[in-house]
Every structure is written in C-alpha cells, then in structure tokens.
Amino acid sequence: MATEDLPSEFDVVILGTGLAESVVAAAFSRVGQRVLHLDRRSYYAGHWASFTFNALLTWIQQHHEEPQPEEVQDWSSLLEEGEELIPLSNSDSIRNLQVFCFTSEEDEEEESPNTTEEERGGADEDAVRETSETESADSKDEETNQKTEEREEQAPQTKGEEPEADQPTPSAAQSQSEPTKKKISYTQLLKEGRRFNIDLVSKLLFSRGSLVDLLIKSNVSRYAEFKNVTRILTYRHGQVEQVPCSRADVFASRQLSVVEKRKLMRFLTSCVEETEEQRAYHGRPYLEFLCDQQLGDNLQHFLIHSIAMVTEDTPTEDGLAATRHFLRCMGRYGNTPFLFPVYGLGEIPQCFCRMCAVFGGIYCLRHSVSCLLVDKETNRCKGVIDSRGHRISCSHFVVEEGFVGTDRKRLATPTRYLSRAVLITDNSILPGNSDQQVSMVTVPPIAAGGPTVKMVELCPSTMTCMPGTYLVHLTCQSVGSAFDDLSPVVTRMFRTPQSHDQVTGPSVLWCLYFNMADGSGLEVEGHDLPSNVFLCSGPDGALGHEHAVRQAESIFLKILPEEDFCPPAPNPEDIIYDGETTSSTTGEEEKEEGERGEEEKEKEVLEEKQSLQAEE
Amino acid sequence: MHGRVKVKSTAQQEEEKRKEREKKLKVYLAARDACFSKRKEGIWDEGALQVTQQLLSSNPDFGTLWNYRRETLMHLETVRDEDEVQKIYEAELSFLESCLKVNPKSYGSWHHRGWVSNRLPRPDWARELGLCDRCLSLDDRNFHCWDYRRVVVKMSGVPVDQELAFTDRLIGSNFSNYSSWHYRSTLLPLLHPESPEEPAPPPRRASSSPPPSPQSRSHRVCEEQLLKEYELVQNAFFTDPNDQSAWFYYRWLLGRAEREEIISCMFVSREEERVSVAFSRAVNVSSAGLLLVLDGQPQRVEWRSVHPRFKHSPVWICDLAPGTISDVTNEHNLTVHWMEKHTHRDCALYTGRTESWCRDSATDQELFRSDLSVEKTSVLQSELQSCNQLRELEPLNKWCLLTIILLMRALDPLGYEKETLAHFQTLEEVDSMRSAYYGDLCSKFMIENTILKMEYAEVRVFSISDKSLTTLCHLDQLLLVTHINLSSNQLHRLPPQFAMLQCLEVLEANNNSIENLEGVYHLPKLEEVLLKNNKISTLADLEPLASCPKLKRLDLRGNPVTQVANVEAELTALLPSVVDLLL
C-alpha cells in the first residue's frame, strides 16, 4: 500500500514479520483491532524466512556488506507538547557467515558412452592432483582455511569462479564409482534456484504442539500444506540408523532383537502413565532411570537422543515429559510426531499475516518505524514516526527485538547464539526404498562437551530443493562459531574435501554456516520501554515452535485479556456482510456472496503482496 | 472498506439445513418414482443411466436401481459398438469410484464394480488393483475391498509372489490385520509348497490355480520358508503380544498337520455278536459307505451310532445275525471297508476267544501331537525357547502362555505335564473371563495324557481321579476300556459320547457334580456304577441306566435323589437287574 494512503491511526502497530509478530497481528486483526504491520525488509518473516537459492545468495551478500550507517533523521519537529522520542535501532544478529561450494562451476561435460574411458582417465588424473593439493592444504590447515574464508567473505556469490581449487576429490571418486550419475553443478543450482526454499531457522511442528493447535483453532491451517516427517534417524557408531518409534517401525526394525522390541514397546506404553517408580527418580538423571529399566545400550540411545531429545543428565521427570510429548504426537498425522510445511517454514508467518490481512490488517514491507512517540507523563507510547516521517498514532506497539537497542533491553544472560548450517547434498543420508523421505536426525555430541546437533533432511517433494538434491539443516547451541561447531559433524557424515576417504555419505554440493541469536532468553516486557510496547524475540533453538506461540499469546492477553486468542475464522459460507439483507436472499446466494467477498479480499491481499515484491 | 463480518446464528443455520433437507428429499422421491416408472415401461437408454446415477450417488445401497442399471447396460451392449461400450463402462467405473468415496463399504457399489469389470471389453486391471490398494490404505480391514481385490487378482493373474509382497507391505504398515495374515496362509503353500520333489514348479499365476480348498491340496509350507515366517510373526508378537492376529497366524504356522483318515479301531464281541468300529473322525455311515465282510462274505447289517442323538459319530456298531459267530470253537476273519476313503481294517476272532480287536493306538498315531505339525523337534524346541523368552518379559500374557502349552504338548505331553498345569493355573487367573475354556482345554489335555499312560501300560483301565476335569472328550479312544475311574473331578454330566465305551464294566464317578447320565446308554457289559456324592436329583435322571442289561451294583449315596419318597421301590421297578443298591 502506498505510504500516502496509510491511515494515521491504528490500534496496534507491529514492526517485524517473524512468527510471533505475525501471530500477534492475526490475533488482533481477528478480533476487530486495526492493525498496521510493517517490516523494514523486502521479504516476510524476518529471521524465520525461507529463500530461493538466489535470494539466499543476495541475503548472504547483504550480510557481508558493511551495514551502512543509517541517516539519523531528526524527527523532533513532529513532537507535540509533552512527548519525547525513543529512536529504534537496527542490529542484525547474524554472525560468522561462511559459504563453501564443493561442486564445479560449469556443467561437467556430457559423458557420452564412447568417450567414457578417456574422460574417466582424465578424472583420475584430476583426482590425484587434487588429493595432493588437499594434503598440502591439510598440513597448513589454518592458513588455508583462513584464505578460503577471506575469499568467501569477499565475494560469496562468485564462489565458484575458481573451479580448479574448488573441485573436490570426492566428486571425482564418485563419478568413478557411479559413472552414470552426474554431479549437479553450481550453474545448475543457480538455474534451478527458484526450486529451493531454504529456511533460516530449522524447526518442525510437533503434531500436538501449540503451533499445530493454533493453526487448527484459528483456521489458518487452510493457507498451508504439510508433509509428515517420514522417519527419525540417529547417528551412532559412525553410522546413520533409523530409530524405531512407532509400532510399525518396531515391528519392521532389523537392528533390534525381538527381546529389545518387547522391551522398547513395553517402555513406551508404560511411560505414558506416571508411576511411583518414576517419581522415585525425580531429580536424578534420565540415563540412570533408563539404566535401571534394563533396556540395553541401543534402546537407551534411542530414548535419550531421538525420542526425548534430551541429554544424559537431564532430570528423569523432564526426560519422561519429553518422551510423553513425543509419544502423544505420534500417529496423529503419520508414523512420526512431526510435520513440515511444504515450501518451507517461512510459509507459516506469512499464513498468519494473510489471516490478519483478510480481517483488515494493513501490510507494508520495506517500511520501518524510526522512533516511538512517548508521553512523558504516562510513559506510554502514543504513536510512532515511520521511516518516511509520517506520524501514526497507536495504542500499542509490538516490535521484533532486533529493532530495539541493546541499551533498552533487559537480557537475563549474555546473548546466546545458535549455530546453523545449510547443506545442499546429492543424496539422502540414509537412502531407502523411497527417495522422498523427510528425516529428522539426532546427532549426539561426537566429542565430549560438544553440542548435540539436530539435523533435518528435506527431500524435493517438500518443495524446498531441486530434484536430485537434498536440503540438510543443522542446528545446535553454539559453543564456538557455526563452522567450528558443525563442520566436524558435516565432514563425518557427508563427503566434503575435508572428509576422510572412508566417509561414504552424500556429497555436499554447497554449504552455508552462520550464527544467529537465540531468542529463548527474552521476555516480552520488563524492558526500559513504555509499558504498552512489547518485544518479540527471534527464533529459539528448540525443535518446536512453542516459544514463539507462547510469546504471541501472552502479548495478546496482556493487551486484550478479555478477548479470545485467534478464534476460528468463519467458513466463507457462514459470512454475512453488513448491508446485505439476509431475509430476502436464500442460503445459496448468500454463500456465493460470502465466498466472493472473501475471495476478493484475499485477492487484494495477494495483489498487494505481489506489487510489493515487484517493487524490489 | 469491507463490511464487518458476522457469523450466522445457529438457529438460522438449523432452519436452513432443514429446508435444504426437505428440498433434497422431494427431489430424491421424484427421481425414484420416475425411475420405477421408466423401468416398468422398459426404457433402457442413457436417460435411465442418468437418473439412476443421480439417485445412487446419494444412496448407493439401493439394490433395485443397480439392477435397473445393469439391465440398461446389457441392453446398450447389444446396440452399441465395442468402443462405445468400453466408454460407457469406463464412465460406469468412475461413477462407482465416486460412490465408493461416499460409502466405501457399500455392498451394492462393490458388487456392481465386480460386474462391470467382468463385462468391460478391455479391462484395466492395474487401475483396479490401484483402487483396491488405495481403499485398503484408508481402511485395511475393509472386507468388501478384500473380496473385490481377490476377484481382480484372479481375473488379471497377478503372480503369487507379487501378492505375497503385497501382504508384506500391509503387514509392515500395520500387522494387526487378520486379512493380510490369512491371505499369506493361502499364498505360501502355492509359492513354497512343502514337497520340493513335486514335479510341477510352483504355479506362477494365481488365475491358473485358484487357492485350493483344504481337501484338495496340502496346506503345508516348505521348512525354509516356514522358518522365515516364524521370524516374521515373532517380530509381531514380541512387538505387541496382546495383538491376536499374529498369534492366530502363528497357530496356523505351527498346526498344519492333517490327520490321516482311517478306521482306527475295530472290536468284535462274540457274546453280543456285535462289531464296533471307530473312525479317525466323526462320520455318517450312510454316506461313508461301510461294508462288513465276514469270512469272505459281505454281510447285510444295520449300522447304528452309539446314541440316537448322533447322526455323525466316530464310533458305529452293528449286530450280526444271531448265531453267526457265537460258537467259540470257530475262528472268524472280519474286515470293515470304508469305501469312501478306500481304506479298511481286518480283525481275526480266534478260537476260544470271546472278543477281539485290531487298532492303531493313540501313541502309534501320535494322535495328540497332531494339533501341531509333526515338525522337527529341534524347530519346535527353539520356538518354545523364544516363547519362554517372551514369557519372562510378559509373564501374564495369555497368548504367550497358551502357545507355550501347545508347543509343550507337541514336544512331550507327559514330560511337560507339570508345567502345563501350572501355566493353565496362571491362565485361569489372568484371563478369568475364559476360565471355563481353559478348564475344558486342560481337561482335554489331561485326558490325552491319561490315555497315553494307559496305552504305555497296556491296560484297559482308565483312571483320572482328582484332576479337576470339567469335561470329557476323546471318548472314542476309550472303546476298549473296561474300568473307568472319574472320581473327584468337576464333571456335571456323562454326555451321550460316553456310550462309546462299549466294553465298560465298572464306572466309578464318585464325588463329582453329575446330574445327567445321558451317556450311560446301552452299555452291554456295564455291571457296576458308583455315583456317590453327585447331584442326581430325580428318578428320570436315572432312566438311561435301564438300557444297560447287566447292571448289578449301583451306589447313589449322597445324591438328592435318595431323598425322594419311595425311591427304593421305584428304583427296583426301574432297574430290575440291580441287586446291590446303595442309597
């Protein structure tokens, strides 16, 4: 919407289109509040966004550029009597970006059958040469790494311009073993870039988690499509194994003995109810409890790392609660407890934005708030001045924490970070009967004290990567930089130039490492801000979406304690619009009217979105 | 700006729904009447198809309409060329698909689909299989779909191994599925028949050899495959020991042996001039074709079962013409032919002998092990081991206990007797709803064991006192028994089968709860009946005893009947042969 047309008065102004902000926006709009929803960025969902490959490269580039010092404009002329300004800042929490490309820049030459011999010979030679290079690189490990990184940072988008140096050994080895399979080149990735939807955060929806409940309750679910995570995997003894968690899995498992099968099933069915025996272990480690159940190493590993997804010293009550949650979520939509949105997680905030727009919320991207107008006397925010110098009054202001300067935020602990890695690979980490598996992989610390890594492998049918590739997301609480935390796992489980020769996993074509602030420690209020200003934190490190949904609900209930949070949107056929006469029309005609009404609205919203995107 | 949205009140919605329903009903009834009148007039055209389609899509269980539709289609077949017919039938199939979406368990829709598939000039079986798979993935117990699928498989000749892989898939997604396990039991004997020396290779096409009926073909599966099946089914019952379907399949796997059909025993008595014959199963003599040959001469005899209640019985008797074998100085050779089964049994009655018999004993036949197959002992032993392993984990699982009992019986019924009794005790405790069933089953096994012991001892005395028997069975095996002791059990009656004890002289059944003596019927040699402390309450209950001509001694102490007025006189009148009556 053009800025000039913006009304100057709203009930709620929301800055930032992350998940919590979007849910808040939908909730307010749904109960009839006038909502203005802004984002400085040119895309929706902030740190929750999903990007095409090309858009991700742009995003990477933006984060490499020196943030241009924003012109600090003086809006004090707009101040009225008794008001003061609180300027908003713009700190971005993305750090330590590193990009590596392990595939060739151009398409490899077509291997026609008659030239195969020759070509292969050539490849062998290359391999030998490159191996020696890699070895020398190993010897002066640090230096080379340093160099690579520098190069990355200078020009990540031109990464593949030195194919000689980047052509990895494993590619040659692979083309030898599977001469028919051609490795996808960087050019192809760029060409097919629109098929990717690469999430900045990696999460899943617990089938009975608060986000799924909210999606159903609010009817927002109709805007999205989901796929079941099809299997749970774990990394153990250097191998990827499937974790049997449903009855059918346990039955079909080849790794478990029949006795283990019985023990596992018995444990899973018995732990649903809390028993005296379990209470006796309160405060003691879950591992101890499991040991005393005489389950054996296999089952203990599955239960701690893949089912409860806790650490060995987690207290028993927490471990059991996590196990129960996992089990409650099983079987609702399939054989695992998780759902993943088709087209990526970035869809979810957008779905809530759409709901907000359908109920009259107004959206502007690339449009920010420069400062808050605060009534000195009451210490309440009366309104905002937007980035174009318009004064917009509002009763409440909700903002993504990144827009608020650190001096005004109360953080309980020093900012924690998440380490993230995104890989594009050429095969599944555990090829099975079907090549369209969505896998949740738990990787326990590979060295003592190391982080526990959660990995999600997405197949092309989730519409997040191009056919022939898999998209792998790794997430952990950071100890060091994302590269330090995650590259040991990547080189062990996947083939990269740094991997040992024995590694048989899929080859990494391209990968990205970065750190992002962990939003889990932030409260929605209690900061050095007016009492009607609320903060939404960025993504947290947990697998589910509980944190963001809880935050959104608590903001909503603080402002409108009497109202229902996201009540179901009426079905189109039940909607009547003011001014329509209900007595003279038959039900059928009404239905058509209703549908048309909403469709029109939605169309408008869509057009609005498109026009915004066209502006870019 | 758009108007504010309001949601309709429920009362308004209700009213609208009601109107909607009325409207629908009117349309439906009008269409139905139109249909019926069209049919009466013999109109078989596209219009008929249309109007029935309209009705059936809202109510697919309207059989008359399906019939009308079939009539119309058959008529159209005669007036259209093949391509058009194909098109019409294809439209029919897609219409049926929409009906099945509305009600996936409609008899009418599935039956009609089978009919259409049969008449389709160029059927697309792959599509039909796909439809079945889709339906079964939604509800793997939809037996309509299973039925239709069998038809499709038969018509299209899906290879047996593919079908087995199909059951693998279904069982893999949810093993709690009787249909899939059962389907396996019909496929395995085709794909992996027991005798590899059989000249014909395993049939590849189901169409060429439909699943054989139990009589026509062995249900046995070769040992190698059997071991794989044991493993599969063990995975199922270790995963969920409370799921019955896997246990039932396991029982099928273990109990595949079929008993040979023979005349198991023939008994000749000189005094009564009577022949008694026992078969390996209950038969009806009139249809079995029984022929008695005495010294080379076929005899015209009247066969009768031991009790008028039985049309089918394992024991049949006949009386020879008076004087044929009564002379003790003569030797006779008797043969009974069972014409239907082309089998016979000979018996020689030597000079000086008053009776003679010829039989296969229960031990010879391994009779009581045949509930399970005569499998290699080592295999059964290892199955028993894994079941015991499961029992350690799930000591109270009834399916596991029951299977252990059966395996023990197959292995060594006498050796495991003590453990078997202990397991039965646990079973009655953990599954008290079925304690009577377990009691009867335990009685059966105890009787079998007693028969075995009696045969090893080579005596004609059957003694099974104080074993908590609740029922009597295998009485056909006791044809030669002269003394039976059933004292101190929990029997309520001596059933009609008891009349099979044709040689019985002494019946001891003190301390039971017997109130009915129906089976003590025409026992020619019975002399002594001891029924102390039972529940015989009326004189009428004692009437069967009057049919036993040699009864001399009767003990009725401790029975309610002794309180009946004038009982002694009445009994003397009823049983004149009794000289020693204890009341």
Image (tube, rainbow, N blue to C red):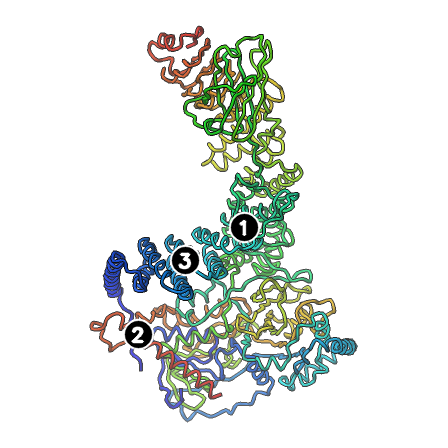
Residue B31 higher or lower than A359, as above or below: above
Q: Quadrant of residue A511?
A: bottom right
Q: Are marks 1 and 3 in contact (CB under 8 Å)?
A: no
What's the residue at 46%, 92% (across, down)?
A74
Q: Percent from the top left, x then y, of residue A457?
A: 58, 68
Q: Quadrant of residue A509?
A: bottom right
Picture disc at residue B116: 3
To which chain does the residue with label 3 belong? B
Residue type (three-letter) at the residue carrying disc 3: Val
Residue B196 higher or lower than A303, as above or below: above
A369 vs A102, left or right, is: left
What's the residue at 35%, 77% (across, down)?
A599
Q: Which residue carries the number 1 mark?
A: B208
Q: Quadrant of residue A381?
A: bottom left
Frontmost residue, B204 versus B95: B204
Q: Percent from the top left, x then y, of residue A95?
A: 60, 79
Q: SS class of the residue under badge 3?
A: helix
Structural distance between the alpha carbons of marks 2 and 3: 42 Å
Q: Quadrant of the C terminus of chain B?
A: top left
Specify few, some or many for label 3: CA neighbours under 10 Å numbering under 14, 14-19, or 20 or more.
some
Q: Which residue carries the number 2 mark?
A: A594
Specify few, some or many for label 1: CA neighbours under 10 Å numbering under 14, 14-19, or 20 or more.
few
Residue type (three-letter) at the residue carrying disc 2: Gly
In primary-sequence order, the first of circles 1 and 3 is 3
